[in-house]
Amino acid sequence: MRELLDAESVDRGLRRVAGEILERHPGQQNLVLLGIRRGGVPLARRIGYWIEQLESVKVAFGTVDITLYRDDAATALANPRIGPSEVPFSLDGCAVVLVDDVIHTGRTVRAALDALLDYGRPRSVELAAVIDRGGRELPIQPDYLIRRVEVGPSERVDVVVGSGGQPVVLARPYGSPSIAPGGTLP
Amino acid sequence: MTGERLRHLLGIEGLELAEIERILHLAETFLEVSRRPVRKVPTLRGKTVLNVFFEASTRTRSSFELAGKRLGADVMNIGGSASSTSKGESLRDTIATLDAMHADVIVVRHSASGAAEYVAERTRASVVNAGDGMHEHPTQALLDAFTIRRHRQRIEGLKVAICGDIAHSRVARSNAWLLPLFGAEVRLAGPRTLLPRSIAPWNVQVFDRIEPALEGADVIMMLRIQRERLGSSLLPSLREYAREFGLSPERLALANQDALVMHPGPINRGVEISPEVADGPHSVILDQVESGVAVRMAVLYLCASGEPVTPEGG
């Protein structure tokens, strides 16, 4: 097990992403942060917190659950853990920033795009991620990124809550005890 | 809790509590889908659901149809009078034809008890029983349990009175299996001629008057009086039935103050239930309709997801 990013680097990265989002969206016109359940949700909240610190504005916030939109939903998920999507407003005309923890194949983001389009027709959709571990299977790239890493195919990369109660990024071999997204280290 | 797909849903009898919990848990999620601006997800895209109704039904059929469509499946309705059965085809040949169409799920309603099982033995598709004769109507019992839970957060310890033509009711039978599994106290009430000969397999009480069953009840399920039973020796007149067994405001007062009034529909106003009660604050009859779509989405999802036939899948 190795730590790719410590808690301080993750938080500094989220703060930088918040700044970049504000640069590209002056005046925060109809800006919406959408966390992809479950790993992206606390990160999206933290980005929202930093935006509030930087500009003293509150940005609209929602979550999407992609389980029902997965491209293998009808074949692989006999016992899915489906959570609620919470988008309590129409996304018509909004500038959506999707937030996820790790971008890998791109399939999660593809599913999230399908899911969010059911809530309206946004003006634009961008993607923010903490870690890009490569291995893309679809032409999808992050617009905001904290770190790109090189890991072998036998390693998994997770954003988990470290001993200090803050998110850290770990690389571990597949088959090591799984930690729920945003979960705490044993 | 198992993670396997549901092969068939033929009845509540024989289902384990964990399996029922899994269906009800999934239904919570699907309830949310029905409340969105876009009430459709692509989960069962490319899957085929056949609604095969040999017996008239509007609400159950449309509930299954909506459930399938909201999950993105292709749904086809095959009705009794428009189908080849009216041209003399046997049920066996009808099933063989439907099976050759590569349906993933066949939802079947038939007037013969045991018809769903008969179909299940002769098709590769998953079979969901939407009511077979006087046997079972499992999705109705599931949606009843789901509705009670939404209002009371529990079923355990509740007193549930089921009133009407118990002997001929598949809704009563499915509920008599299901509710005691959750720890409810079930009371069946009806005219003596419309009570089952034996209640041996169920953990329930039986009354030939409605009042003792209503005493302190938390949930009251009224069953529809089927007019085809009228005039026979079983049920002399509707007026007499309404007087002896109809749920009036006075009788409702015997139940718990916050009792839920349920009915699987369609209701006969002024017969088994008075209009004041059907439209009153205790009635959750329309919630049952909403719950029905969510529960049937969960059942269709569990039947149609996963690779057909082979138990493995990644």
Image (cartoon, coloured by chain):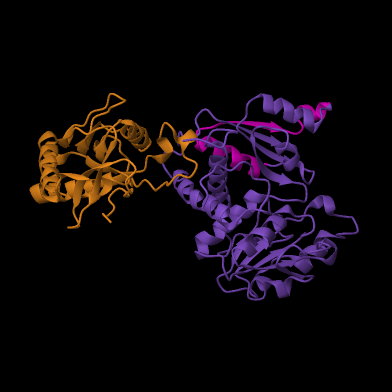
Chain colours: A orange, B purple
Is residue B40 in sight in this rendering? Answer: no
| In-image side of A91 versus B94 (left or right) | left
Please determine whether, in this image, residue B255 is positioned above or below residue B51: below
| In-image side of B193 versus B148 (left or right) | right
Q: Position of residue A145 (x, y in %)?
A: 16, 36
Q: Which residues are magenta?
A: B58-87
Using the image as rendered, state which of residue B127 and residue B169 is in the foreground: B127
Q: Position of residue B216 (x, y in %)?
A: 63, 75
Using the image as rendered, state which of residue A178 and residue A85 is in the foreground: A178
Is residue B290 in sight in this rendering? Answer: yes
Count of numbered circles in the view: 0
Which quarter of the picture shows residue B83?
top right
| In-image side of B228 versus B124 (left or right) | right
Residue at the outermost right position: B233
Please determine whether, in this image, residue B276 is positioned above or below residue A78: below
Which quarter of the picture shows residue A27?
top left
| In-image side of B16 versus B132 (left or right) | left
Q: Position of residue B185 (x, y in %)?
A: 64, 70
Q: Position of residue B297 (x, y in %)?
A: 54, 43
Q: Is residue A73 magenta?
A: no
Q: Is residue B70 magenta?
A: yes
